[in-house]
């Protein structure tokens, strides 16, 4: 992968080595209703940004609650998923930020270099529609794609 991507890719033996001292941590594994989280609070260094794409499957509640900023695409969304059996241990609503509010400048995002930020962007259909419009425009400009009969 190093040669293919032109990046320094390193294989590590433990999750701790993949997380500790990293500026950016993205996890992307199976989403589990019965997770076995392994990422510890002290592994996420001051100033780190984390994006768990796999909900809380690998992140212990102490890490999620211990973040200086816990931002989601919609503040209510994790709590809706919690009713379905996910997110057993997340910060309370009053500690969560809506990414839309951050992007619009209604609330501050990072306020210091030492803040640990977790962005739990669970995906919203609005994001998909906005992306689809950009992809469609680019495809039309390049003459790509095919119309499908319904």
Image (tube, grey):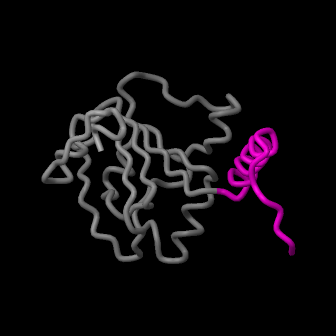
Asked if residue 36 lies in the magenta stretch, the reply is: no
Residue extending farthest to the right is 150
User: Closest to the observer: 119 or 96?
Assistant: 119
Instruction: Name the residue rendered at 29%, 38% in the picture.
Output: 3
Instruction: Name the residue rendered at 51%, 46% in the picture.
Output: 95
Left or right: where 61 falls relative to 19: right
The main secondary structure of the magenta stretch is helix
Check the image and report above or below for 62 versus 37: above
| Quarter assignment of residue 142 | top right
Instruction: Name the residue rendered at 35%, 26% in the picture.
Output: 114
What span is colored magenta in the figure? 124-150
Left or right: where 31 falls relative to 15: right
Q: Please state, as top left, top right, bottom left or bottom right, where the C terminus lies in the image.
A: bottom right
User: Closest to the observer: 133 or 68?
Assistant: 133
Check the image and report above or below for 24 versus 149: above
Asked if residue 142 lies in the magenta stretch, the reply is: yes
Percent across and percent down for residue 63 are 32, 50
């Amino acid at each position: 992968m190093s040669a293919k991507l032109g990046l320094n890719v390193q294989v590590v033996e433990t999750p701790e080595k993949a997380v500790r001292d990293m500026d950016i941590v993205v996890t992307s594994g199976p989403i589990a209703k019965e997770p076995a989280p392994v990422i510890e609070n002290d592994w996420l260094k001051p100033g780190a940004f984390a994006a768990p794409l796999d909900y809380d499957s690998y992140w212990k509640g102490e890490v999620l609650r211990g973040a200086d900023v816990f931002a989601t695409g919609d503040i209510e969304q994790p709590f809706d998923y919690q009713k379905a059996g996910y997110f057993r241990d997340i910060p309370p609503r009053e500690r969560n930020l809506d990414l839309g509010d951050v992007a619009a400048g209604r609330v501050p995002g990072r306020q210091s270099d030492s803040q640990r930020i977790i962005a739990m962007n669970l995906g919203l259909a609005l994001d998909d529609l906005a992306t689809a419009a950009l992809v469609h425009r680019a495809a039309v400009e390049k003459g790509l794609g095919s119309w499908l009969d319904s």
